[in-house]
Amino acid sequence: MKKGKILVIALLALILGLFLGSRGIFYKNKKAEISVFVPKEAIAGETIPFNDIFVKVAEKVRPAVVRVETESFVEIENPFGDFFSDPFFRRFFGESQPPNVPQKRKVVGLGSGFIISPDGYIVTNNHVVDEAKKVKIKLTDGREFKAVIKGRDKKSDLALLKIKARNLPFAKWGDSYKIRVGEWVLAIGNPLGLDYTVTAGIISAKGRQLQLSEYEDFIQTDAAINRGNSGGPLVNLKGEVIGVNSAIVTSSPGGAFMGLGFAIPSNIARKVITQLKSTGKVERGYLGVYMQAITDDMAKSLGLKSTKGAIISEVVKSSPADKAGLKRYDVVIGIDGKEVRNPLDLKVEIMKHSPGDEITLKVIRDGKIKEIKAKLGSETKAPSLALTKTNLGLEVAPLSSSLRKMGYKYGVEVVKVYRGSSASSAGIAAGDVILEINRKPVRGVAEFNEMVSRLKKGDIVMLTISRGLQTMIVTLRVD
C-alpha cells in the first residue's frame, strides 16, 4: 500500500515538473523572441528594438526631404488652325483669320528632393527640373521657397538646387560601394502628390543598366517608388543616403509601381553634385575609344573563354587611348582591379574619374593578358567621333551592336540626314550603312571624318550604301 502511494506521488511530481518545465521553457523562448536588438551601428550608435528602426530612420531623414514643384511651358498647335485654313470656311469668315500659330501652355510638374547642407542646397533629378521656368520648394514644416537651379547634368540625370534659408535639416551621404543585396532600405518622397511618404524594401540588385541615360549603374530596390518620388533619397538603416530615386520599370499603362525601382548610387551622385556646386558643370574623364559587346562568334574568333568584357572597335587618333597604345580588337576585361563585364561597365568606371587621373586597364590582346596604363583627358574637350553637320549633309555614328550582329564588319551608320541637303536629294536615309567612299572602305567614324574632310565644295563623291539586303551606289555633289 505504501509502495503504491509512493508511486502515485512520484508520478504526480513528475507530471507537475514536466508541466512547470514546459511553462518555463515557453516563457524563456517568448522572452528571447521579444528581446531582439539590432547592432549598435544600426542608427546613430543606438541600440534599439528592430521594430523601431524604421521609425527612427524616418524621423531622422524625413525633415530633410522636400517637395519640388516646377512650372514650364510647352508649345501646342492651335486647335482651330485647320478650321480657319479650310477654303470652305474662309468663304464665310474671310481671309483675315488667325494663322495656325502654336500656342504656349503651362505645365506643372511634381518631384522630390533632399537637402544636403544647412544653407539650402538640394539634390533632385535632372528630369524633374528640365525645361522648368520656375521651381518652388516646400519643406516638411510648411515653408515654401523659390529655388535657383545651380547646375544640371543630363548624362547622370542629376540636378542641384539652392534656396535662401539657414539652419535647415539635412541628409548625410552614405557609401554606396558598401551596400549589399538583401539590405533593408527606405525610400522617402512625394509619390502621386502624397507628401513625405516613407516606404520600405530591400536592395534587390546592384549595377543595373536600363539605357535610360548615358551613364548608369543603378541600385534596384523593391521599396515602393511611384511618379513624384523622382529625386528623393534612398536611405540605409543608418539614415544615410545611398541612392537618389530616379526610375521605375512597369508594364502598367498608368505607370504603377511593380516592385522594380531604381536609384542612382550615392558615390556617383555625390561626385556629380560636388562639381555642380563648385562650377555648375561636370567634367569627366575621357579615354577615346569606341567599344561594343562581345558576341559568341567574336569570342570564338578571338579565342576568348567568355563574352565578358568590351572589345575596342575604334581608337580616336591622338586620344589618351591612342597615346597609351590601345588598339582595335583589344578586349578590356578590367579597370583598376575591377571586372569589366560589358562596354557600359567600362564607360561608367571612366565616368567616375576626373581628367588627369591615371587608370590601369587589363586587356586581352592576341590571346595574352596585358596591363596598360592611360592618363585620362577631359570629356568636354574631346573630339566627337559622331559628325555634326558635314558638307555631305548627314551625321553618322559607329555601327550599333544590332548591325554588327547582322554581319556588318565595317562601315558607319547614318543617324540623321538634313532636309534639302545633297544626301537627302540622293535618297540617303537614317539607318543606311555607308560602306565605301569613292570605292575606299570606311572602317569607322574617324576614318569617315578624315575622308570627308578632304572633299571640296562642288566635288562629286560616290558612296556605297547598304540598306537591308540591298547594296546601292549613289553619287552626290558636296555642298
Image (cartoon, helix red, strand yellow):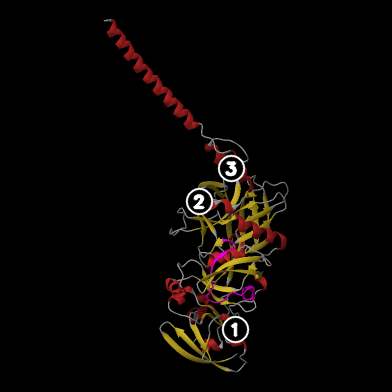
What is the distance, in whole Å, between disc 2 and disc 1 at their CAs? 46 Å
Residue 295 position in % (x across, y down) = 45, 71
| Mark 1 secondary-structure assignment | helix
Residue 73 position in % (x across, y down) = 60, 65
Q: Is residue 425 visible?
A: yes
Residue 295 position (above or below residue 428) = above
Q: Residue at x 59, y 80 (%)?
A: 387
Disc 2 crowd, CA 10 A, few/some/many (<14, 14-19, 20+):
few
Residue 384 position in % (x across, y down) = 62, 76
Q: Is residue 328 part of the magenta span, yes or no? A: yes
Span shown in magenta: 319-337
Q: Is residue 401 part of the magenta span, yes or no? A: no
Q: Which residue is mark 3?
A: 57
Q: Which residue is mark 2?
A: 181
Q: Which residue is mark 1?
A: 449
Whether residues under marks 2 and 3 lie with C-beta atoms below 8 angstroms apart, the answer is no
Left-right relation of 479 to 31:
right
What is the distance, in whole Å, between disc 1 and disc 3 at their CAs? 55 Å
Q: Is residue 99 visible?
A: no
